[in-house]
Image (cartoon, grey):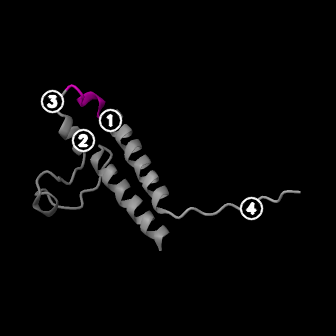
Amino acid sequence: MRRILMLVVVTVLALVLFYLSHFWFLSLWDRAGLFGQEALRPQGDLLSRWLRGTQAAPFDLVIWAIGCFVILSGAQKLHDLLSPSTPSEPSEDP
């Protein structure tokens, strides 16, 4: 059960990161935005929109990749902390 829960959490996290990038190609909701929030537009690419007009705008893909690495690494650390450690097999001494 815990394994399925962690797979669902990682899948949702990956979808959110995918939505933040400019690789999002799905229009799953209308132009008014998700739940009526105009900031959550159906085209995705929120990171580019947030960085528009700043000096970091040309580096949106690099910032997205670094952010994905940090967030997924944090999720892995959280999984390692929450999952029970398996005892190692006792070594047989001659």
- Location of residue 63 with respect to 81 vertically, above or below: above
- At 45% from the left edge and 64% from the top edge, which residue is drawn? 7
Looking at marks 4 and 2 on the same chain, the residue that comes earlier in the sequence is marked by 2
The residue tagged 4 is 90
The residues bearing labels 4 and 1 have C-alpha atoms spaced at a distance of 45 Å
The residue tagged 2 is 47
Q: Of the residues shown, which amino acid type is indicated by label 1? A: Ile
Q: Which mark identifies residue 63?
A: 1
Q: Answer yes or no: do the residues labelled 3 and 2 have beta carbons within 8 Å?
A: no
Residues in magenta? Answer: 55-61
Q: Answer yes or no: do the residues labelled 1 and 2 have beta carbons within 8 Å?
A: yes
Question: Quick one: label 3, few (<14), some, or many (20+) residues within 10 Å?
Answer: few
Where residue 85 appears, as percent x and y from the top left, is: 56, 61
Residue 92 relative to residue 85: left or right = right
- At 29% from the left edge and 51% from the top edge, which residue is drawn? 19
Question: Quick one: label 2, few (<14), some, or many (20+) residues within 10 Å?
Answer: some
Residue 88 relative to residue 55: left or right = right
Looking at marks 3 and 1 on the same chain, the residue that comes earlier in the sequence is marked by 3
Question: Quick one: label 4, few (<14), some, or many (20+) residues within 10 Å?
Answer: few
The residue tagged 3 is 53
- At 40% from the left edge and 65% from the top edge, which residue is drawn? 8
Looking at marks 3 and 2 on the same chain, the residue that comes earlier in the sequence is marked by 2
Q: Quadrant of residue 35?
A: bottom left
Residue, far front: 93
The residues bearing labels 1 and 2 have C-alpha atoms spaced at a distance of 9 Å
Looking at marks 1 and 2 on the same chain, the residue that comes earlier in the sequence is marked by 2
Describe the element under mark 1 as helix, strand or loop.
Answer: helix
Q: Of the residues shown, which amino acid type is indicated by label 2? A: Leu
Where residue 68 appears, as percent x and y from the top left, is: 38, 44
